[in-house]
Amino acid sequence: MTSTHVLNEHKKRLEPIERKCSYCGINNFDEMDDNYFVPLFKEKDRTNIIVYRSVKFSKILIGIPRCKTCLDIHQSAARVATYYAWGIGIAVIILTILMGGFWVFGGVLSCIFIGVFAPTLIKNKIATKKGILTELEGAKQNELVQDFVINGWSFTQPSA
Amino acid sequence: MNSKLSQEQIDNIKTSLLSGYTATETEIKKLVSAGFDEEVAKKIISDAMKSLREELFEQSLLKKKKEEARSVAILVITMVSLIGPIFNMRSIGWYMVAVAIVAAVAYYGFKDKPIAGIIGSITVVILFPIMYNYYFASRNSYIRIELLIPLVMAVIPALLIFLLLSKLIYPKH
């Protein structure tokens, strides 16, 4: 337990005590599950022998207070961003099919690239336009998250 | 009654707080004995803690970003170096393109030591085909893992050049 969070052993996460939303700074959260639980990772052990690579890591979920309105904005932004990104990707494929030949291969690759990377960009753009912080930016403002990162934890999962 | 800190006091507080969060009480007492009101002292220390935490947090994120950029750069440089000899590319044009690619990638991957990174990476691209031809010159067959031997033979001199240039050009790092 910390002074700002309590450990929920059943759900294996740190739940916030502070109720004020970190994303809009106005409302309080109603339900614990409305909060954003940012995953943090820390590498425990790495084996790297040319033909065999493995990594063991710890994971923890830290709750960032989030009101119902901000939750709705984040969720709808994620949905809309996915539709937009794959829509653009499919449009690129159709365009390259019309061009024919080698272009189709480039179109498929571009579609996968857009489908994987563009949703986050579009989602963040929508959240910023609505006047609230993105999920990650809100998490970065949290003091407990900052303390974990200072002590070697990371927002990205270690890869082998 | 005092309410402003001197630069020396700010630096001392930062140094003390870096040694652990238990230092806060001691620092508040120090400020009170230096003539600060207790509430003002608490606020000053709390603000100093906040700014220090944000500074360290940004540094940690930046360090992580640099590490990730470096890993990606090393992977790309290795792949580009391998392409020429493996696909038997003899055109000088390909090697010029390869040098341009690794120079650009090394610039982003080694942003704190760009010159050392660029020259070290170009060394791998130029040396690998030479080592590859030298190692496999009189061979009729080989197993894939053996590719690592000429690669290591090219990487070692490149690494030495990188370290030497790092020491010469960026002695503060």
Image (tube, rainbow, N blue to C red):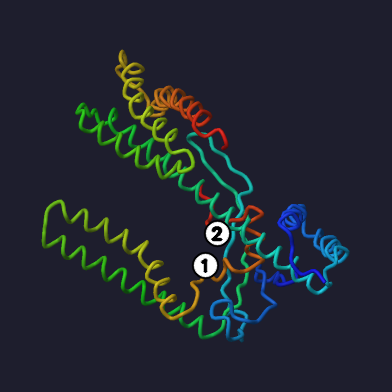
Q: Which mark is residue A155?
A: 2
Q: Amino acid at mark 2?
A: Phe
Q: Residue B94: percent from the left, percent from the top?
A: 23, 33
Host chain of mark 1: A
Kindly give the residue lying farthest to the right in the view shown: B33
Q: Residues within 10 Å of mark 1 (few under 14, many from 20)?
A: some
In the rendered image, which quarter is residue B96 located in? Answer: top left
Q: Report helix, strand or loop for mark 1.
A: helix
Q: Residue B61: percent from the left, percent from the top?
A: 55, 55
Host chain of mark 2: A
Q: Residue B119: percent from the left, percent from the top?
A: 39, 31
In the rendered image, which quarter is residue B125 located in? Answer: top left
Q: Which mark is residue A136?
A: 1
Q: Seen in the image, is A139 located left or right of residue B148?
A: right
Q: Residues within 10 Å of mark 2 (few under 14, many from 20)?
A: some
Q: Residue A111: percent from the left, percent from the top?
A: 27, 61
Residue at coordinates 79% horizontally, 70% vertically from top-left? B42
Q: Seen in the image, is A74 located left or right of residue A116?
A: right
Residue at coordinates 32% horizontally, 20% vertically from top-left? B130
Residue at coordinates 31% horizontally, 60% vertically from top-left? A112
Between the residue at mark 1 and the residue at mark 2, the CA separation in whole angstroms equals 9 Å
* Residue B170, placed above or below residue A81: above
Callout 1–callout 2 Cβ contact below 8 Å: yes
* Residue A66, placed above or below residue B50: below
Q: Which mark is residue B139?
A: none
Q: Do the dots labelled 1 and 2 sit on one chain?
A: yes
Q: Amino acid at mark 1?
A: Leu
